[in-house]
Image: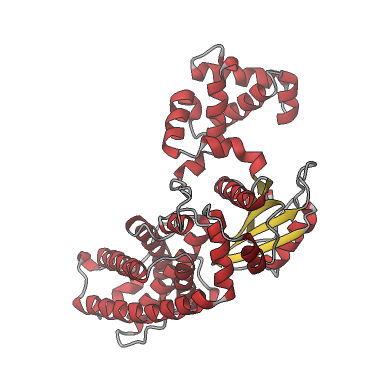
Amino acid sequence: MEFSWISDLDSSRSVEPCCDPATLALAGTLLGDGPLRWAIATAEGVTQHIISNVPEDPSGPAPFETLRRGVEAMVLTCLCALVDGQEAAYAVPADGVDTIRDCVHRGIPLDRMLRGIRVGHAFLHRALRDGAPDGEMPAKITEALFEQVDRLTGELAEVYVAERDRWEVSEEGARWRTVEAIVAGEHPDPVTAERMLDYALDRYHVALILWREGAADTGTTTADLLAADLLAACGGESLLRVGGHARTVWVWIGFGAWPSSGLSWPPGLPTGWRAAAGPPSYGSAGMRRSHLGARRAARIAETMPAEGGVCDYGDVRTACLLTADAEHARWYMDETLGPLGAADDWSGQLRDTLRCYLASGRSLKTTAAQLGVARNTVAYRVKRAEELLGSSDVVDQLEVRLALEIRRFADVLEARPLAEPDGSPGALRQMYVKGELAL
């Protein structure tokens, strides 16, 4: 049977599924464990391929997960249709619909969205061909795949047009376009903007970015409840919440006076939620400043444990600055640290010890207390670190301290470059459209 070999597909890569559990369960029953693993791993590859070949698609954590959920659901549906027979109806899963709606909200044009579908299907076709006996795709499967992509593009185009028409006239869309203009550096009429947003601009603002992660939404906490909890925790006076992108919410908390005593955030967040906060700043320009700071902090938050609570820009601003130019930061780090930058656990201990030692003003006692080790251990590690650096006066080198801070958040260097609004009309939308960390 031309389709029977699909049941032999499998993947050695372990990829955590992310689509709707009902879609996953149905596909698992029909396909079996091996093909299910193959489909999930292949869907991740499809997602990366779309991002690489269609720059208008997202690359940040929240929109990436939205795209991956849609792709995974559609790959599973596609494989199930092949197993059922090529005449099986192609029903677009809910996760796929959510992905298309997210494209509308981020301003991705219809033709680019359709291009992404074609690119993704081409990748899937090649993956199936490589998994076929002797690497030769049966003609019947090729025909079935082409029929499926025709149905898919037609149905998703209808979803796109319907959502675009709704979004353009909705109050939700108008609110989103207003904050989009503010963050892009434009200057909407303040009276009109305040009326539209129901939020005063002439005050101090702290921006937050909230996003959901994981295979599915967990718990009972909504974005509204989380935003209200954060408002109460930091002592703010007013709240603006705008949710324009799937699984991502933008929040501003207003203060009548500068929060000079600092901000207090909860020690942890509800399961499945992540958050990053920008610095306090004043007026509509301050809304932009704080939001961009939160965006920078969000990049750092992705490299940190989820249990850490809100990632505050004030705590990571040095790392934000040092990793803004990822390629240059990587060069600087590698050239400065040399062997000390190795990825093994022992080198990591040496770096942590040296970083604390330099930050404490070269105090063995303080460093030992911070790390919970003996002073002799600190002295030994510092000596070994100096030997790896090839410098006996490392404690006087600012460059080493900077390189150690970069190495501490080295994972963020693997993210795509962070574009900034240039102040021209529609700059923020263009920023999203160019594959940015669209939070």
Q: From the viewer's perspective, is residue 353 above or below residue 90?
A: above
Q: Position of residue 71 (x, y in %)?
A: 42, 68
Quarter the N terminus occupies: bottom left
Q: Report if residue 255 is visible in the image.
A: yes
Quarter the C terminus occupies: bottom right
- Number of marks present in the image shown: 0
Say which of 149 and 143 sits in front: 149
Q: From the viewer's perspective, is residue 348 above or below residue 203?
A: above
Name the residue rendered at 35%, 73% in the picture: 7
Q: Position of residue 268 (x, y in %)?
A: 72, 53
Left or right of 59? Residue 204 is right
Q: Position of residue 374 (x, y in %)?
A: 73, 23
The image quadrant of residue 371 is top right
Q: From the viewer's perspective, is residue 263 above or below residue 402?
A: below
Left or right of 266? Residue 140 is left
View extreme (top): residue? 392
Left or right of 206? Residue 214 is left
Say which of 151 and 21 sits in front: 151
Colour scheme of the picture: secondary structure
Name the residue rendered at 61%, 19% in the picture: 382
The image quadrant of residue 126 is bottom left
Q: Report if residue 16 is visible in the image.
A: no
Q: Position of residue 176 (x, y in %)?
A: 56, 66
Say which of 272 and 26 sits in front: 272
Say which of 252 and 17 sits in front: 252
